[in-house]
Image (cartoon, rainbow, N blue to C red):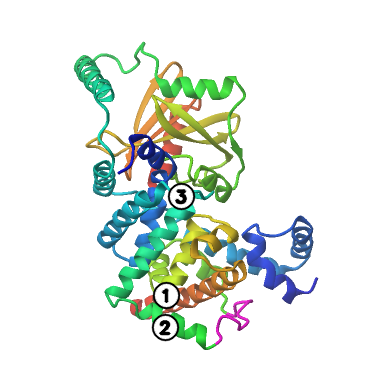
Amino acid sequence: MQCNEVENLLETYLDDEMTLSDRRMIESHITSCEVCNAKLNEHKVLQDAVFNLGEESVPYSLRRNVDAKIKALTDKEPSSQRWKWWSFSVAGMVMSSVLTAAVLILGTGLPVESDINDPFVDAHIRSLMVNHITDVTSSDKHTVKPWFSGKLPFSPSVHKLKLKQLKLIGGRLDYVSDKPTASIVYKLREHVINVFIQRTEVEQTSTSVRLSYKSSYNIADWQKDGLDYRVISDLNKKELEKFSQKLALK
Amino acid sequence: MHSTRLRKRFETEILVHLEQAYNLARWLLRDPVEAEDIVQQSCIRAYKAFARYRGESPAGWLLTIVRNTSYNYLKQKKKHQNLVSFEEAIHTNDEDSDVNPCHISLDPEQLIEISEQQGLVRTAINKLSAEYRETIYLREIACYSYKEIASIVELPIGTVMSRLSRARCQLRKILLNEQQQERTDAV
């Protein structure tokens, strides 16, 4: 293939919109042609720069207004269903008072390590046990991110972090505490790192990274742009903190 | 009036794409408050039509509605200078002209500088025409395929490809200008 032909196809190549045989031709040309390789890199850097802008999260006001408008356009529920809602709300009230009590007890200085199972730790262990670490396996963020599209009520951002020996492994769809959850999976040496992302329901005053320890796993969590992040791994505390700080800054 | 069941289906099939809808509107309108308004209107339109919807791409369907609502709004507000100039560009046969490969290239040093400045990239995209902005968003950020973009913007794939290529070339041109501007400002 000639350079000018290859140049014409570089974007289609990067967009992954090419037949396998064409890809092979481009690849074999690039390995031997520095000029085309530099051009490919140029396209790639610019594409990444735009991709890294990411999506803005939906303002709470928009979500609330849309929900309200759509409810107003819907028929009233039959009375039997109203009953259900009523009992739900009673259950909700009971739950919330239990939670308040729990918060009060925890707030009085009990150790951070608790006996209550952490649903995220469970999800982390499950991902290792059943050999179901990823639903989409790729070290390319452009593959991992779009895979989540339409599967979650938000789109998680996927970043490649510049940390020695760190690899992006892929992504997985989870349900943790009855909420749809994106799990982005990394590996640092042989340690699996699960990054769980959910939509924020309770805003915290502080958004900085907090570290804790549960059932022999190190955990880091923070909030950013309306999302809750929780990182779990058997990696040592120092490295997990470094990883989380980097990710939280992205 | 719609039933509760239909509403639930609308929430799980259509409203899960609210984030993309909002982002597309933000890029098109370049204003977060207007974007909220347009997305809200679009969701209501979509909900009213949802009982008849039989398509296979709920995300694309919602985005098409957001897009049409946004353009109507832009036209009404006479904010459509970009739109007009783009249409003129089509009439001057730009659509057929060969802009691939793009003759504007950046050296490695410039590339590194650009990729480290998100503000610069954002401003540059916002200087593109509405059609270019949406194409860049749909491909580079939302990662839709050519075929999916074609269905969202209701154009043939070939047109989408050349539009994308021209949008990228234009973006380089603006980035280069912005960068030079910054450098001269710094001196």
The correct choice, above or below, for B38 with respect to A153 in the image is below
Question: Relative to residue B109, is residue A74 drawn left or right?
Answer: left
- Extreme residue toward the top, this view: A115
Residue B143 sits inside the magenta stretch: no
Range of residues picked out in magenta: B93-103
Q: Chain of mark 3?
A: B
The correct choice, above or below, for B111 with respect to A187 in the image is below
- Mark positioned earlier in the residue sequence (2 or 3): 3
Q: Are marks 2 and 3 in contact (CB under 8 Å)?
A: no
The quadrant in which residue A218 appears is top left
- Extreme residue toward the bottom, this view: B92
Q: Nearer the viewer, residue A25 or A165?
A: A25
Mark 2, residues whose alpha carbon is within 10 Å: few (<14), some, or many (≥20)? few
Q: Chain of mark 1?
A: B
Residue type at mark 3?
A: Tyr
Q: Nearer the viewer, residue A238 or B53?
A: B53
SS type, badge 1: loop
Residue A114: x percent and y percent?
Answer: 34, 14
Residue B141: x percent and y percent?
Answer: 48, 57
Q: Is residue A28 visible?
A: yes
Q: Are marks 1 and 2 in contact (CB under 8 Å)?
A: yes
The quadrant in which residue A91 appears is top left
Residue A65: x percent and y percent?
Answer: 24, 47
Q: Which mark is residue B85?
A: 2
Q: Nearer the viewer, residue B60 or A227?
A: B60
Q: Is residue A250 visible?
A: no
Residue B102 sits inside the magenta stretch: yes
- Residue for badge 1: B129
- Mark positioned earlier in the residue sequence (3 or 1): 3
CA distance separating discs 3 and 1 = 31 Å
- Residue for badge 3: B53
CA distance separating discs 2 and 3 = 34 Å
